[in-house]
Amino acid sequence: MSSSERCFRGLQKTTLLDFPGKVACVLFVGGCSFNCPYCYNSSLVKREEPEIPWSAVQDFLARRRNVLEGVCVSGGEPTPAPFLPAFFSGVKELGLAVKLDTNGYHPESLQALLDARLVDFVALDIKNSPAKYASTCGLPAVDLNRIRNTLDLLQASGVTYELRTTVVAGWHDVADIQDILSFTGGGARYALQPVQRDADSLSGRRFVPPTSATLRAMGKVLAANFSEVVIHGT
């Protein structure tokens, strides 16, 4: 993925779900290092959405600073964007908390943000079990050491974080979740979210979410080593 993004390409003005415990907005960065076939943010990944002028971003945050408690930055994949440190610093000056959504493939960028104490919450996508990781990302190969390094950074940082997996019927099963548990080693919070049924995907294909019973079985596996397991959409 190129780091040439100069600004954001999407804005959700209010969310009560994306930043646990806070009223927040979501800003979206274009481009991604992965090519997940089921991704429903295809226009962001392909950089088809127009850039939002910085003046519009700044004016929005200034107007909403007394309503919002936090800002969530998602994508695409935001971590390679060169403007993030300066933007996060400005958000913190407004008195707002920062949440970062990431696929974990750029640990060096995350480390810089953590070292500067610019993030308060990180959501790390765990795409699948190690054996299925590359195919789930739509790539011929994935360096899992990068994901492992990101996990290690988060576990040592003291920053609140969650791991999460978008679950697709036929792509994820309970055995995969057991392998994910072995790979991650457990933690404080894990979120499972079913894929959006029949959403416009990056690959143009339609995907089906798992049954509620399957999600509950997966959650039971994760509960062995995670203090909190959240299952969305059930």
Image: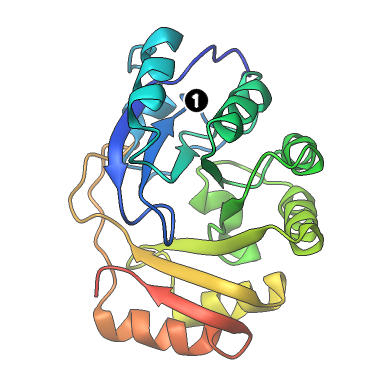
Question: Count the marks: how many?
Answer: 1
Q: Position of residue 204 (x, y in %)?
A: 26, 37
Q: Position of residue 43 (x, y in %)?
A: 33, 26
Q: Is residue 179 left or right of residue 52?
A: right
Say which residue appears at 71% left-offset and 53% top-offset. Answer: 147
- Residue named by callout 1: 31
Q: Quadrant of the N terminus?
A: top right
Q: Quadrant of residue 6?
A: top right
Q: Is residue 1 visible?
A: no
Say which residue appears at 50% left-offset and 53% top-offset. Answer: 136
Q: Quadrant of residue 109?
A: top right
Q: Is residue 156 left or right of residue 194?
A: right
Q: Quadrant of the C terminus?
A: bottom left
Q: Position of residue 84 (x, y in %)?
A: 62, 26
Say which residue appears at 54% left-offset and 15% top-offset. Answer: 5
Q: Is residue 218 above or below residue 61?
A: below
Q: 159 or 177: which is nearer to us?
A: 159
- Residue type pointed to by label 1: Gly
Q: Quadrant of residue 81?
A: top right
